[in-house]
Image (cartoon, rainbow, N blue to C red):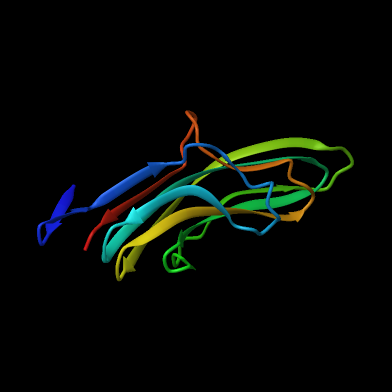
Amino acid sequence: MSGTNAGLRIAEDGFAALPANVNLNAAASGTFVDTGLVLALPSAGRYHLDATVRAFLGTMTTGEGAYIVARLYDVTAGAVVPDSEVLALQINVAAGTSPTLLAWNATAPIQVRYTIPGPRTVRLEAARMTQSGITDGASVVSDVNGRTTLRYERVA
């Protein structure tokens, strides 16, 4: 749906899907990674922003504690979109005497209202947080089995 403002056409909504998986294991624990999933909010106003974040963690260890946090980041303002952080996936394996192979997938939603004074660019970021052990794989995933998406709707 679109509206007009002094003859200009303003997009009232937008949608994008992550085109390729993003490796979080290549970055240090706690480092937020730009997933490349970005939307341009076209004008001042209040928006509903939502994302669906599919995450993967894998480990083969005797004691692992790790999780993935995702958030929306306002590139224009250089700040995290307030209240947009979510725990996308967590894995905890009790220490034992033999290794256990685990690979977990999960999907988490982000849903926030965001009021801006002018055009903004918003992107999805994610970080792997390792508390103990070693993660063999950590990713934000998007494929035919489940998409990572980002959407906005201008409401005022």
Residue placed furthest toward the top: 144
**Residue at (45%, 54%) from the top-left corner?**
123
**Residue at (64%, 47%) from the top-left corner?**
24
Please give left or right for residue 3 compared with residue 64 in the image. Answer: left
Tell me where residue 100 sits by quadrant. Answer: top right
**Residue at (55%, 41%) from the top-left corner?**
106
Q: Nearer the viewer, residue 124 or 131?
A: 124
- Residue 29 rendering spot, x and y as whole percentages: 70, 56
Can you say which quadrant of the picture contains the C terminus?
Answer: bottom left
Please give left or right for residue 91 compared with residue 35 in the image. Answer: right
Q: Nearer the viewer, residue 9 or 88?
A: 9
Residue placed furthest toward the left: 7
- Residue 35 rendering spot, x and y as whole percentages: 53, 48
Q: Nearer the viewer, residue 150 or 133?
A: 150
Image position of 6 with respect to 1: above or below: below
* Number of numbered callouts drawn: 0
Tell me where residue 116 sits by quadrant. Answer: bottom left
Residue placed furthest toward the right: 97
- Residue 129 rendering spot, x and y as whole percentages: 67, 55
**Residue at (76%, 48%) from the top-left corner?**
64
Tell me where residue 7 sits by quadrant. Answer: bottom left
Image position of 60 with respect to 91: above or below: above
- Residue 114 rendering spot, x and y as whole percentages: 35, 64
Image position of 143 with respect to 53: above or below: above
Residue placed furthest toward the front: 7
